[in-house]
């Protein structure tokens, strides 16, 4: 019997809006991966929706601690540890504990350093929290920041985001910590009408870029969708370049389908009908 890869997925869960665990779970399952969620919080809807007094937000830090204790007692091991949104410094400490206790030599640690987007830091992230996140990413074998997060990790102003391939290759080299880890930066664009990802592959020691047509809209949750497909591809044994190309292509197709359907932007992209392409 072939081994089914097992992933510990540290992320929030939103009842409405295609993002975080509501995207990660079905995508990894479709790609033949057992996803073991470690929820950081449960929300009635993702944070871009209006938040009246009845909106629900349940911090699960205590439950995370209990889960780690239970997993340790069960002697669980993971082929990958994937982290997304973290809500507090205490949760950053718990992610560090997860990595320390459950990482094996061959375990891939993929961190999506969710801190901001479109040049702005999320309101829940203080400068100290951003600094702690930057320190924690040094534990990762692969990071997947967007352009805003890449600038934060490097201590650069967002206006300095590279617009040329040579400039992005310089940022990728710096983000790789001298070649010690792999990096995928999302939202990269050098020419009008195209967007994609810039990659540094630690194993092969080389740069690559995966680009696709840029659709005329921006949706919440596409970063989570990208990271999930990327991770699924890597756990299938694809090189970083192939997994990144698969993720870029899949996200573009999902965005194009959603635009054609003209569904609300806040709902996220319609990835469900296209999951068969990941089988």
Image (cartoon, helix red, strand yellow):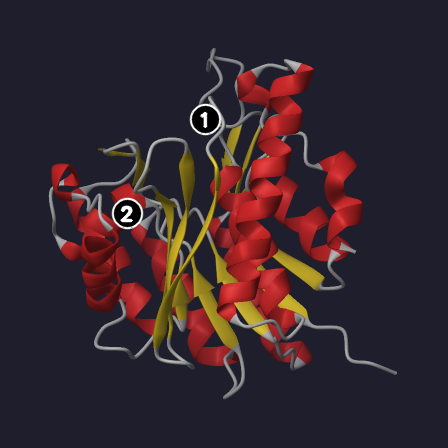
Compared to residue 251, the image places residue 94 above or below, namely: below
SS of the residue at dot 2?
Answer: helix
> Residue 34 placed where, x, y %?
72, 64
Q: Residue at x 63, y 75 (%)?
A: 237
Compared to residue 255, the image places residue 109 above or below, namely: below
Compared to residue 164, the image places residue 217 above or below, namely: above
Compared to residue 160, the image places residue 267 above or below, namely: above
Give the alpha-carbon distance from disc 2 to disc 1, as whole Å: 17 Å
- Seen from the viewer's position, the closer of residues 44 and 248 is 248
- Seen from the viewer's position, the closer of residues 1 and 134 is 1
Q: Quadrant of the C terminus?
A: bottom right
Q: Residue at x 64, y 15 (%)?
A: 263
Q: Which callout, 2 or 1, points at the residue further toward the start of the chain?
A: 2
Circle 2/circle 1 CB separation < 8 Å:
no
Q: Quadrant of the N terminus?
A: bottom right
| Mark number displayed over residue 218 | 1
The count of marks equals: 2
Q: Is residue 110 left or right of residue 2?
A: left
SS of the residue at dot 1?
Answer: loop
Sort mark 2 into few (<14), some (14-19) or many (20+) by Cα contacts within 10 Å.
many
Residue under numbered circle 2:
149
> Residue 105 placed where, x, y %?
50, 88
């Amino acid at each position: 019997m072939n081994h089914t890869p097992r992933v510990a997925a540290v992320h929030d869960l939103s009842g409405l809006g295609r993002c975080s665990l509501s995207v990660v779970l079905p995508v990894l399952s479709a790609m033949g991966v057992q996803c073991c969620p470690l929820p950081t919080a449960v929300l009635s809807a993702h944070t871009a929706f209006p938040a009246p007094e009845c909106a629900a937000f349940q911090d699960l830090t205590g439950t995370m601690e209990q889960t780690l204790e239970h997993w340790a007692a069960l002697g669980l091991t993971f082929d990958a540890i994937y982290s997304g949104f973290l809500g507090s410094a205490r949760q950053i400490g718990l992610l560090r504990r997860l990595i320390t206790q459950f990482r094996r030599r061959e375990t891939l640690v993929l961190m999506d350093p969710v801190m901001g987007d479109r040049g702005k830091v999320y309101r829940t992230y203080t400068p100290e929290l951003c600094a702690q996140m930057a320190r924690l990413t040094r534990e990762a074998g692969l990071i997947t920041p967007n352009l805003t997060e890449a600038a934060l990790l490097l201590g650069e102003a967002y206006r300095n985001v590279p617009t040329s391939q040579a400039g992005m290759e310089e940022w990728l080299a710096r983000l790789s910590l001298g070649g010690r880890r792999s990096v995928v930066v999302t939202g990269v664009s050098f020419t009008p009408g195209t967007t994609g990802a810039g990659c540094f592959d630690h194993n092969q020691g080389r740069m690559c870029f995966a680009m696709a047509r840029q659709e005329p809209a921006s949706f919440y949750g596409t970063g989570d969708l990208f990271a999930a497909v990327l991770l699924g591809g890597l756990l299938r044994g694809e090189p970083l370049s192939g997994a990144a190309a698969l993720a870029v292509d899949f996200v573009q197709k999902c965005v194009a389908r959603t635009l054609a359907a003209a569904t609300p932007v806040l709902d996220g992209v319609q990835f469900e009908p296209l999951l068969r392409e990941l089988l």
